[in-house]
Image: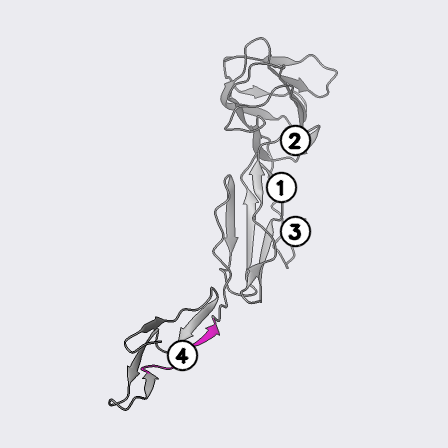
Amino acid sequence: FSPGDVVVFSCDDGFELIGERNATCREANNSGAYYWSNPAPVCQPVVVDTCPALPDVVNAERTGNGTAVGGVVLYQCEPGFTMTGASSLTCLAGVPPSWDNSPPNCTATCPVEEQRAAGSGVILSPGYPEQYGTDQDCVWVIRGCGGPVTLSFRSFQTEDGYDFLNVYDGSLDTAAVEYSGQPDLKNYTSTTSVLYLQFTSDGSVTDSGFWIDYSSACCSDPGAPLNGNRAGD
C-alpha cells in the first residue's frame, strides 16, 4: 500500500463491525516509517434473541406471544377453510433463532365426506373465493343437535345445468334439493338433524362457486387451550 491509500473494512452477514471502518496509510513525521491510521476492526457475531417476524396467512387468524425465543404462535383457519401444515410454531434458540415450522396454508378443499360438528359454520366451494375446479365431487355432512339445520346462502354461482349442489335431508338416499346456476337463494331448513351436501362439476366451464352458512340450535366444540385443560363437558 502506498501513502494515502485508504482501505474500507466490512463484515459478513450475521456479524457486526467493532472498530473503525476506514484506515489510511500514513508516513510517521517524514521518518520513512509508515502506519495505518486505525487498526483492523473485529467482526463479532450479531447476538439475536428473536425469530423473524411471521407473515400473515390468508384466511387465517394468528395469536401468540411474539417472536422471542420460546414464544409460541398459533394459527387458526377461518370457518370453512382447511389447514395444511402446522398450526403451532415455536421460536427455537440458535444462531440465529428460528421457527420450528413454516406457517400453514388455509384453503377451501373438496372433501370426500367431511363431517361437520353441531353448531354453526361455513361451507365453501373448493378454492373459494377463486373459481372451483373441473370434475369435482365433494360431500359435507352436517349433524345438528337433534333438531333441524338451516342453510343460508351468502353467494352462489355455478355453471347452470352442469355443475350442481345437491342437498339431502337425512341421508343420500332421499330426494335432493338441487341448486345450479344462480338460484333463488332462500334459506333452507332440514326436517331431520342431518344434512348431506354434495357438489359436482363437469369437465369444462367453472365459476365462482358458493359460500353457505349453516346453523343449528347448539354451540360447536369451543376447543381447549394449548398446554391447558377444559372442564364442563
Q: Amino acid at mark 3?
A: Gly
Report which residue position mark 2 lands on: 144
Q: Which quadrant of the figure has residue 149?
A: top right
Report which residue position mark 4 lands on: 40
| Classed neighbour count for the residue bearing mark 3: other residues with Cα under 10 Å, few (<14), some (14–19), many (≥20) | few
Q: Position of residue 147 (x, y in %)?
A: 65, 28
Work out which residue is located at the far left of the displayed protein and give it: 29
Q: Secondary structure at mark 2?
A: loop
Q: CA distance from mark 4 to mark 1?
A: 51 Å
Q: CA distance from mark 2 to mark 1?
A: 27 Å
- Pointer 2 or 1: first along the chain: 1
| Classed neighbour count for the residue bearing mark 1: other residues with Cα under 10 Å, few (<14), some (14–19), many (≥20) | few
Residue at 66%, 54% in the rendered image: 231
Q: Amino acid at mark 4?
A: Ala
In the image, the segment drawn in magenta is 36-45
- Mark 2–mark 1 CB contact (< 8 Å): no
- Mark 3–mark 1 CB contact (< 8 Å): no
Q: Quick check: 190 above or below 34? A: above
Q: Position of residue 200 (x, y in %)?
A: 64, 18
Q: Position of residue 112 (x, y in %)?
A: 70, 28
Q: Which mark is residue 232?
A: 3
Residue 54 inside the magenta-drawn segment: no
- Pointer 3 or 1: first along the chain: 1
Q: CA distance from mark 4 to mark 2?
A: 74 Å
Residue at 30%, 88% in the rendered image: 32
